[in-house]
Amino acid sequence: MGPNFCDGEGKPVALSVSKGETRILNKVFYKGKVFVNVIGIWQKGFSEPMWIMTNLKAEDGLTIYFQRMKIDETFRI
């Protein structure tokens, strides 16, 4: 079982996104311990969606992730 998320009322929140779609979940409670923002994106050509969990604005977390991915790819040998 993967990480569990719930809304402010304690109701479970499922991580689901369709192909070609982006989904943002703001202020979800992660494992009953901390509020986070989550963004899921399922890009063309990928076999499954990518999920980013952050304490930043969800879109900012995704931007930083993509910037970091470019750096990692540059140094890949």
Image: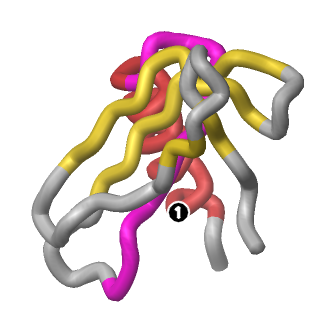
Is 5 placed above or below 59 here?
Answer: below
| Front one among 52 and 63 | 52
| Front one among 39 and 64 | 39
**Quadrant location of the C terminus in the rendered image:** bottom right
| Front one among 67 and 12 | 12
Residue plotted at (27% across, 64% down): 42
- The amino acid type, in three-letter code, at marker 1 is Glu
Q: Residues within 10 Å of mark 1 (few under 14, many from 20)?
A: few
Identify the secondary structure beneath mark 1: helix
Where residue 75 appears, as percent x and y from the top left, is: 63, 61
Is 28 placed above or below 12 here?
Answer: above
Residue plotted at (15% across, 74% down): 44
| Front one among 1 and 60 | 1
Residue plotted at (80% across, 19% down): 34
**Residue position for label 1:** 73
Residue 52 inside the magenta-drawn segment: yes
Q: Is residue 5 left or right of residue 70?
A: right
Q: Is residue 32 left or right of residue 43?
A: right
Total labels: the figure holds 1
Q: Is residue 74 left or right of residue 36?
A: left
Where residue 43 appears, as percent x and y from the top left, is: 22, 66
Give residue 32's quadrant in the image. top right
Question: Start and end of the magenta stretch?
Answer: 47-58
Where residue 19 appears, as percent x and y from the top left, is: 17, 71
